[in-house]
Image: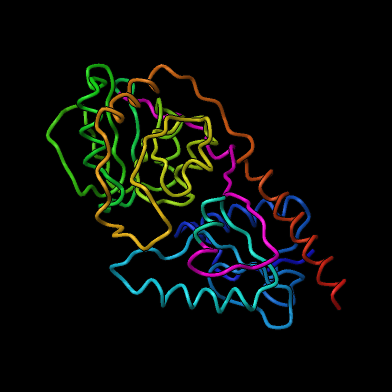
Amino acid sequence: MRVRFSCDIKLQSGKEKFAFRLSEQFKKLGIKIVSKNPDVNLVFVKGVYSGKINIIRLDNAWINLKINSGGKNKKIYKTMKKCDAVIYQGEYSKKVCQKFIGIHKINTVIPNGCDFSEFKETYVHRRPYVLAFSRWRPHKRLKEITNGFLESGLNKDYDLIICGDPDYVVKDKSVIYVGKTNKKILNPIIKGCKFVIHLAYMDCCPNSVVESLVCGKNILHTDSGGMKDIVKCSGYCIKDGDFNYKMVDLYNPPALDMNSIIKGYQTLVDRPGYPRKDLFIEEIAKLYIAFFKKVIRLKRKSL
């Protein structure tokens, strides 16, 4: 089978990072990655290949009422209508895309995946630590993450390591800001942590969470967006604001219950983790290939 990716295959943006991992695994499974004349063109947001089978991968719809989300969703809809099938990253992704973008009758749900072998080295810190990392924006809730950690009492025995440029900073020796990191630095930090905190509002299927789950880390997360879909039993879930499939003020998220955050910290510190083999990239690649073959069969029957 010959597969084309509509996006660059690099380790830059989230979609490109996943595209790189998927393409490398495809090669191991005998799939040829091409730039011309594919059997399947895998579309990342845009890039339909005329005259060939096009399958679009949709992670989320635009739901921020402070920008022209409706216009952006219409553009995605036009691309989707030119495609033969859709792959969603989770059940939330499917529901929110079908609500705000439209429905495609041929679809499936396949989450992002990660290569377990990426986590070889373990970061050695002065004492045990928990981890939070993101490109910090208001809906990522760094303030709640930090204050919940300090109020939980974990700071007596643990540090909180924060990766990325923070939008909220405290002066406490147990809160460590390491700034932007690359894969070489970040992966050992993930492997060495006790668990990961990701309290983002309406996040869909972040690579950082998939990476942590593959590495065997539990996730302190909210029940908004697609987090429940991918974390499942590998973490502690906090009730977020209700979402009734209407546009939201994304960067002004509802407040979380601090007692629930504190309980989450105190619960996960004693809970063992295990690698999530269902998110290993080899398993995800097999699901992609099986769906590609299904769509090819359906296309041939319709001719």
Q: Residue furthest front?
A: 244
Q: Residue furthest bottom?
A: 50
Point 29% across, 51% down: residue: 139
The correct choice, above or below, for 182 with respect to 119 in the image is below
In the image, is residue 124 part of the stretch drawn in magenta? yes
Image coordinates of residue 104 in percent, x first then y, are 64, 68
Is residue 240 left or right of 300 when viewed as pictured?
Answer: left
Point 80% across, 63% down: residue: 1
Image coordinates of residue 247 in percent, x first then y, are 36, 63
Quadrant of the image for the C terminus? bottom right
Where are the magenta residues, as a range? 97-125
Is residue 216 left or right of 262 when viewed as pictured?
Answer: right
The correct choice, above or below, for 80 with respect to 240 in the image is below
Tally of numbered discs? 0
The correct choice, above or below, for 133 with respect to 16 in the image is above
In the image, is residue 243 part of the stretch drawn in magenta? no
| Foreground residue among 147 and 256 | 256
- Majority secondary structure in the magenta region: loop
Image coordinates of residue 239 in percent, x first then y, are 36, 37
| Foreground residue among 260 and 154 | 260
Image coordinates of residue 129 in percent, x first then y, are 33, 26
| Foreground residue among 168 and 201 | 201
Is residue 139 left or right of 96 when viewed as pictured?
Answer: left
